[in-house]
Image: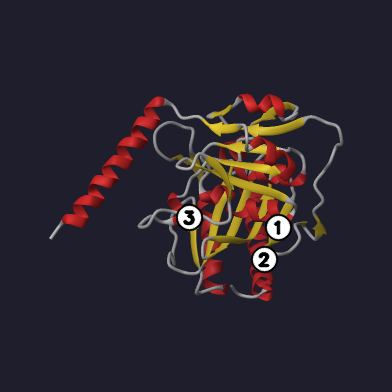
Amino acid sequence: MSGLNDLQLIELEALRMLSQAAEMAVARRDKLAVEYKGQGVSNPVTQVDREIQQLFAESIRTQFPDHGMLGEEGGGFGHDADYQWVVDPIDGTINYLKGLPLYGISVGVLYRRVPVVGAIWLGTGELLHARRGGMAHVRDQPLHPREVPGSGLLGVRHPGFRTTPKMAGTGLRIMDTRSTGSIAYDLAAVTLGWMDFALLRAPKIWDVAGGVVILEAAGGRALWYDRRRGKWLPLDGFLVLRGQRLESWSRPMLVGRRDVLEQMARCVIPSYPPALLTSLREGIRAARQAYRRCRTAP
């Protein structure tokens, strides 16, 4: 891997791009043109989303011509490059549309699929950033997560998780859970100590690539659930099946304080509806059959 100076340069450039993107988001939030991805109105995209992603794409091509990029709004490039920038131009677009400041702009940089630089700007004004091996910062100040000794736990919990009887023996006291509508904001809130954990059902890579670097630099931890092995594992990199691209990555995740995760990982697991389990089994069976046909083909 390249040395620390390279990561410092990447972090500084990520902050410069992110600051420009934040200015654009604030300046344009009252003059929005909105479209919808797919059916219904639950997945909107604005022209600002696309313009912010284009800003990153142009800057990366200019400053780092040998790097690649992928983003939520498509239009990626350099998929085989060692360094990949992963951009979510606005995570929490519905909140952004409605004027609720619980949204964020997130950028993560991977080196051979390992997250090494992350930066998030929040609609509430905070700018978090870190690089692998360095400290987490809020703007230019070291990030020290908020601690309230003796308080119960507050966290994010997406639908689709269940607790086992082991929970009763952990001593964990969960006061309540929240849903912000933005995974980037959730990760930042956990990193800052505003919340203690987040159970994320199926985040996409652009939702979390920036946040996990900052979280771990601030002393937190990110885990992903391995369905095949039936256990939580450290998120040391974004792995996909051979032939798949990084943008296909999506896994159940548990993030938060290390002491909390150590206990929660023993008693909280994803729960899958019967129809989904059937679909997964059929997909695995079909893949195995296709593999056997390929091996026996002349």
Q: Residues within 10 Å of mark 1 (few under 14, many from 20)?
A: many
Q: Which residue is drawn at 56% across and 51% down?
A: 89
Counting residues from the start of the chain, the first of labels 1 and 2 encountered is 2
Residue 3 or 228: which is nearer the viewer?
A: 228
From the viewer's perspective, tell me whether residue 217 is left or right of residue 248: right
Location of residue 93 by image quarter: top right
**Cα distance in 3D space between marks 3 and 1:** 23 Å
Q: With 292 as the anchor, is 19 left or right in this view?
A: right
The outermost residue toward the right is 149
Q: Where is residue 238 in the image (x, y as percent from the top left)?
A: 51, 55
Farthest residue, direction left: 298
The amino acid type found where label 1 is placed reads: His
Q: What residue type is labelled 3?
A: Leu
The numbered mark at residue 11 is 2
Callouts 2 and 3 close, C-beta under 8 Å: no
* Label 2: how many Cα within 10 Å (few below 14, some 14–19, many 20+): many
Q: Nearer the viewer, mark 3 or mark 1?
A: 3
- The quarter of the rendered structure image containing the N terminus is bottom right
Q: Residue at x 65, y 70 (%)?
A: 7
Sequence order check: which comes first, mark 3 or mark 1? 1
Determine which of the numbered discs, if any, sits on residue 239 in the image.
Answer: 3
Q: What residue type is labelled 2?
A: Glu
Residue topped by disc 1 = 129
Residue 101: x, y in percent? 68, 40
